[in-house]
Image: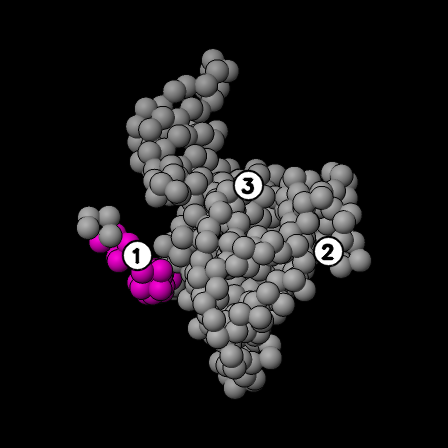
Amino acid sequence: MCIMLTIFIFALILGVLVLVHELGHFLVARRNGVKADEFGFGFPPRLIGIVKNDVTGKYDIIWGDKEVESPHTIYSLNWIPLGGFVKIKGEGGENAHDADSFARQTAWPRIKILGAGVVMNFVLAWVLISLVYMVGLPQPIDPDERGKYPDQKVQILEVKPETPAAEMGLRPLDEIISIDGVVVTTTDEAIQGITAKKGQEFSLVIHRGETVLTVQGVPRMEYPKTEGALGISLAETALITYPWYTALFEGGKTTVQVTGTIFAYLGKMIGSLFGGGESVPLDVTGPVGIVYLTKQMTEMGFSYLLWFGALLSINLGIFNILPIPALDGGRIFFILIEKLRGGKPISHLVEGRIHQIGFMLLLGLMLLVTIRDISQFQILDKIRGLFV
């Protein structure tokens, strides 16, 4: 797939996630009587905007970054096409005496406004997963249901690292078509075919998205019982669809389950940092890694891309609600401290500095993760390959 197309799809997904997040802040701010100075599609500098004129009752056009004083929200289109933003009046502590200022509001309205973006990310994930269930996604089926589904297939669910399967370049969701020319229709046939080739080079034909690939490998003679000779786990799957009302229910249930799984993983990871259990690796992917995964999901098909977007939306929501300075969760944390202090807020200067430091640390973390992703996905080697 063309790298430019992959980047475009990545930018589109990221843009939708950010725009929906900011839309949550905007809608709840307006609902609570707080003015939004500007709601923008994309990031500044501004290309064009519109704002209501109280005299004419129509909308005036604003070109460029011209400053406009208006009691109404400016709706703008900006040059950097990634998501959007909302500029809420008084969010930085200014205009604290104005009734429509964020800074004037009591604790609960401010918490609602800050938390609305996270809620919208979970709602978006629910919608996307529900769409996946309506469109259809391969799901494991019971062996007793063989023959019930005409599109039944044998798919790889997991590829263990440092195994023959990993060396062959196999990926989760690859469909096994044949082993040394023998067509495979069940997991039993696949396991028997692979086991029969232990210690011998064999040919495996797989279906990956719209592409049919042939790979070679040598199953191990000795291996852990949990990995098998090749180092993969298999399942028989079929494309299963649901009516819209069932899809909405299943989508909501899956969103809750995925969210719970991620929080459980975070809990284990934090516990391991304080000696509360076995070590859990910090598995973080940056923009480079997400672009790489976007390419894989796009190759797999539209349903997988929707599912990937839903997972990103859940992760974005969880990340933003964590009590980390510069994030929504960090700002909510300061409001809770204010409540514990009997309504006495922390100095806006002190809070602002803490958020600045948090933002710089997040940028540093993103830089480190990006460097790791470039190494892990061998990005530099692939770039050099373009000029050889």
The Cα–Cα distance between marks 2 and 3, rounded to whole angstroms, is: 21 Å
Query: What amino acid type should be assigned to the residue bearing mark 2?
Result: Ile
Q: Is residue 366 left or right of residue 165?
A: left
Crowd class of label 1 (few under 14; some 14 to 19; many from 20; radius 10 Å): some
Which residue is under mark 3? 302
- The image's mark for residue 141 is 2
The answer to whether marks 1 and 3 mark residues whose Cβ atoms lie closer than 8 Å is no
Q: Which residues are magenta?
A: 361-384
Residue 247 in which image quadrant: top right
Q: Nearer the viewer, residue 111 or 258?
A: 258
Earlier in the chain: of badge 1 and badge 2, it is 2
The answer to whether marks 2 and 3 mark residues whose Cβ atoms lie closer than 8 Å is no
Q: Can you see residue 336?
A: no
Query: What amino acid type should be assigned to the residue bearing mark 3?
Result: Phe
Q: Residue 84's x, y, as percent?
A: 44, 39
- The image's mark for residue 379 is 1
